[in-house]
């Protein structure tokens, strides 16, 4: 049977020295590297969750359509519309993506848009990930908060802009007006602010 007196967790006393030694050797030999990756994070238990432990479920939600103003009008367009189920993550957007073959937006690729409610501008990029038939064909890219966006970000060398604390509140990377807010409180405030500035196009059931 199991000898429970010898049970060990990876970093327990009696094992941690060996664990560190192995990690350092592997790193020195170039066999492992340290880098930022996206993980499933539990804001209550403060721990990462394996993909195998996550069960995704469909639920009735909303799809918010937001206007991102172009830095300079292009082909008569003053803004582009992106749709999202998580409007609070827009504070961490690094780009807006369109499909490279989408004729509607060919002239926009490489241009800059103003990220609403922030003092940042972000580029319009072209990537095959975008489904031109879904929504407006323009997708906000938030590499630090979406697994698909992370892959797009890697392909286009986009920054990882994390806007959440370990408790899933808005951190100090975001504009001051939203710092410290729980993500759902921030969502309501962001929607209200977008509406007040005339940047909320519509809300659909999703």
Image: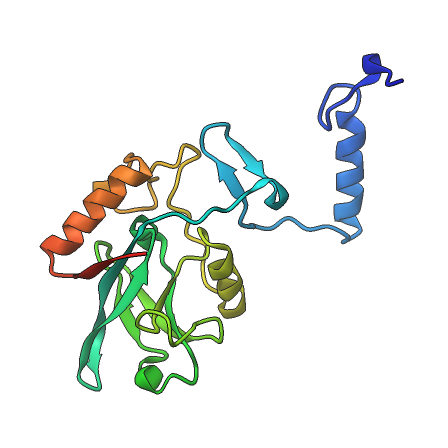
- Seen at 38% across and 83% down, the residue is 102
Query: What's the residue at 80%, 38% (across, down)?
Result: 22
Query: With respect to residue 177, does 116 lie above or below?
Result: below
- Which one is nearer the viewer's eye here, 92 or 184? 184
Q: Position of residue 50 (x, y in %)?
A: 61, 41
Spot occupied by residue 128 in the image (x, y as percentages of width and height): 49, 76
Q: Is residue 29 above or below residue 110?
A: above
Residue 87's spot in the image, x, y percent? 29, 52
Placement of the N terminus among the 4 image quadrants? top right
Residue 130 vs residue 34, the one in the foreground: 130
Q: Which quadrant holds the C terminus?
A: bottom left
Q: Is residue 59 above or below residue 159?
A: above
Look at the image and tell me whether residue 90 can be seen: yes
Q: Residue at x 39, y 47 (%)?
A: 59
Is residue 10 left or right of 189 when viewed as pictured?
Answer: right
Q: Residue 96 occupies which quadrant of the picture?
A: bottom left
| x then y, percent, for residue 171 | 35, 39
Q: Residue at x 72, y 21 (%)?
A: 12
């Amino acid at each position: 049977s199991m000898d429970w007196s010898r049970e060990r967790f990876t970093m327990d006393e009696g094992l941690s020295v060996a664990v560190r030694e192995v990690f350092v050797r592997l790193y020195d030999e170039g066999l492992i590297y340290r880098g930022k990756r996206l993980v499933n994070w539990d804001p209550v238990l403060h721990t990462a969750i394996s993909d195998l432990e996550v069960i995704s479920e469909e639920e009735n939600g909303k799809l918010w359509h937001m206007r991102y103003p172009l830095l300079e009008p292009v082909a008569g367009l003053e803004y582009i519309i992106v749709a999202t189920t998580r409007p609070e993550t827009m504070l961490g957007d690094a780009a807006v993506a369109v499909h490279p073959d989408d004729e509607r937006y060919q002239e926009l690729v490489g241009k800059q848009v103003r990220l609403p409610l922030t003092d940042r501008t972000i580029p319009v990029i072209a990537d095959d990930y975008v489904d031109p038939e879904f929504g407006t064909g323009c997708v906000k890219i938030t590499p630090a908060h979406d697994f698909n966006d992370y892959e797009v970000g890697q392909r286009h060398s986009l920054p990882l802009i994390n806007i959440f604390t370990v408790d899933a509140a808005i951190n100090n990377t975001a504009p001051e007006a939203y710092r410290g807010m729980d993500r759902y409180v921030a969502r309501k405030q962001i929607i209200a602010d977008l509406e007040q500035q005339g940047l909320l196009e519509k809300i659909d059931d999703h």
